[in-house]
Amino acid sequence: MQIFLWTLRKFFLLTAFVLTLTVATFGTKVEAASYNATDTWVIQWYLCGSDLERRFGAATKDLKELLEVKLPPNVKFVIETGGSTEWQNDTVANDAIERYVYDNEGLKRLEKLPNANMGDVDTLTDFIRYGKENFEADHRIFIFWDHGGGSIGGLCSDERYENALSLNDLTQAFGSVYGSSPDNPPFEIIGFDACLMATYDTINAIDGFTRYVVASQESEPGCGWNYTGFGNALANNLAMNGAELGKIICNTYMEGCIAYDDFETSTLSVIDMTKFPAVRTAYENYGTEALFAAYEDPKRFFSRFGRSADKAENYSNDKKKYCSNMVDLADLAHGTKNLLPRTSDTLIDAIENAVVYKVYGDYRDQGSGISGFYTYDGYTDDYLQINSAPLSQKLLYYYLVYGELPEQAEKFLESHSIDDVAGLDENNFSDITPPSESFKIFDVSSLEDLPVELDGNGNAFVTLDQEELDLISSVQFELFYVDEEEDVMLFLGSDADINADWETGVFKDNFRGVWPTLDGHLVYVEIIAENDGYNIYRIPIKLNGQECNLLVAYNFAEERYKIIGANRGLDSTGMSDRELIKLKAGDEITTLHYGMTISGDDTDAVQVEVETFTIGNNPTVTDENLPDGRYGYLFEFVSPTEDSALSRLVHFDIEGGEITTMIDVE
């Protein structure tokens, strides 16, 4: 602690994971005669290496996993490689598209093609067609491998061309080769060994092309799927259907995550596409009920809807940096039962019926297996262009972000009721584009410098009336250290540890004079997820000289922090980093804070390095008493579109463990 003030003035623990919910039946029962030991299987593997291969050799590792499988003559893996500037093996070329087959005779190169962009729809289409025209099979599987970015980010980011496949590209590529056939789809499984792709929009984009979808709601760890595990299972039992194989993919994946000590936030689920139409209808109706409620009273609806989204399990969202804008649909619906009573339960039931198997880690235990879009960062333009996204949801978020609706939607809502929605026709909204001018529903400027009071116990509090409550979806606080002699404010971060009463509008501080430390060193923290049983925080650090985020969960029942690991989060393209680095003894840590002068003209805090230290054998994050001194505290009021306002200042003076609270009356 003294080092901290002086600077201003000048685990490997395997805990039990939750492995879930095996539903007794796997979707619509398939007669055993449809799947025989003599059937032929072709697995097409779209292996876009990207920086995952260049930096970590991750694609090479998965290829080696596959080569450990002894395949029977009637199973073939057809592989397309590319997307990376440097492959970490002596076989795959860096400057070309190559195709290989792995079968009972081993790995063989089929052809070498001119360099092409694996993030382009034409490259994907050509590979899908190649598999269809050159390899007959009773059952087909298609696996995408690389980065994923959810509904907006897409997947398969080719680092040589710096772009990725969109969900519209998936529909176009599979449709142009096979055409949509919901009753007899060409693929048994379409799987995504990529982050964040178990989204409604992804699943809807490939409806009609597959019987089952296997994908992850959260970012996948670098180890990804276990190709030895599920490859051996298939080789030993060719009479499996997609649900049975999907379950094995999930289980072997989680086994691999545990072996790499990278399971706390891992997820993988299997979706039965025969049950997906019910999800589609339920989700469209859910969006329609929300749209009518929003049109009737937008501030009241969106503020409450935003609170439910903040509390729902969500994935790779860092509002201060980049957001995937992915939320668990059933968990969101659970939180909106009072707000959307007609459709919430139906949506929950439909999702639970469609997701026939899932696995998840300790800190992702509220997910249903299917994610959906929610604009955590107040951005929606790319979502409007996704063909597989429901119209009602597009209009809902259009309204939230732009404060108005397209003219035809407004006329529809004025002339219909929730019981009469037949006229909400996709054909009338073929091109939803942002308006040339828009206005904000939520103007929180009236909350800036909101007065703070002290109660009889010395707690600082603010009181909001109903009109003010309808402007916001969350209340947090910011804390900073004040050193008047050195003319500096050093920000310690933000949290939601406030005694909040949304019914009365009273929000009280819960300041106890403690703050998180890493091995005893104060850190800057930001809360990025609030759940019933735990919160997740981001701690910016330099780890052995590399800037990254340390992810930490606080478990309410155990009253302790658990270090999940360090990664780089989402990049500017929306792709999620799959490398999760575990801290180890001897690692050099530099704490990163934000600071600004007190007397100067600074308008924004800048990132500063504060302490550099070497961590010990058992690195821990714990709440420790703050050093004596003055601390500033601000209530932060956040709107559903991520605009925010700050209250008047609260000062906490700490001396010898005693806390004196003062409020700024000007």
Image (cartoon, grey):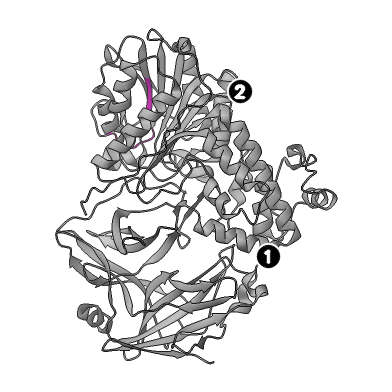
Instruction: Choose between 67 and 433: the one closer to the eye.
Output: 67
Query: Is residue 581 in sight in this rendering?
Result: yes
Find residue 582 and report its horizontal and vertical position in percent: 24, 52
Q: What residue type is labelled 1?
A: Lys
Q: Which mark is residue 180?
A: 2
The Cα–Cα distance between marks 2 and 1, rounded to whole angstroms, is 41 Å
Q: What residue type is labelled 2?
A: Ser
Q: How crowded is mark 1: few (under 14 residues within 10 Å), some or many (20 or more)?
A: many
Residue numbers of the magenta segment: 78-87
Residue at point 42% right, 77% down? 510
Q: Dot 1: what SS?
A: helix
Is any part of residue 223 visible from this angle? Answer: no
Q: In which quarter of the image is the C terminus?
A: bottom right
* Among numbered discs 2 and 1, the one appearing first in the sequence: 2
- Looking at the image, residue 352 sits to the left or right of residue 181; the answer is left
* 650 versus 53 height, above or below: below
Q: Residue 5 carries which label?
A: none
Question: Residue 583 appears at what percent x and percent y?
Answer: 22, 55
Relative vertical location of residue 432 with respect to residue 566 in this rendering, above or below: above
Is residue 80 on the magenta stretch?
A: yes
Residue bearing mark 1: 299
Q: Position of residue 351 (x, y in %)?
A: 55, 39
Mark 2, residues whose alpha carbon is within 10 Å: few (<14), some, or many (≥20)?
A: some
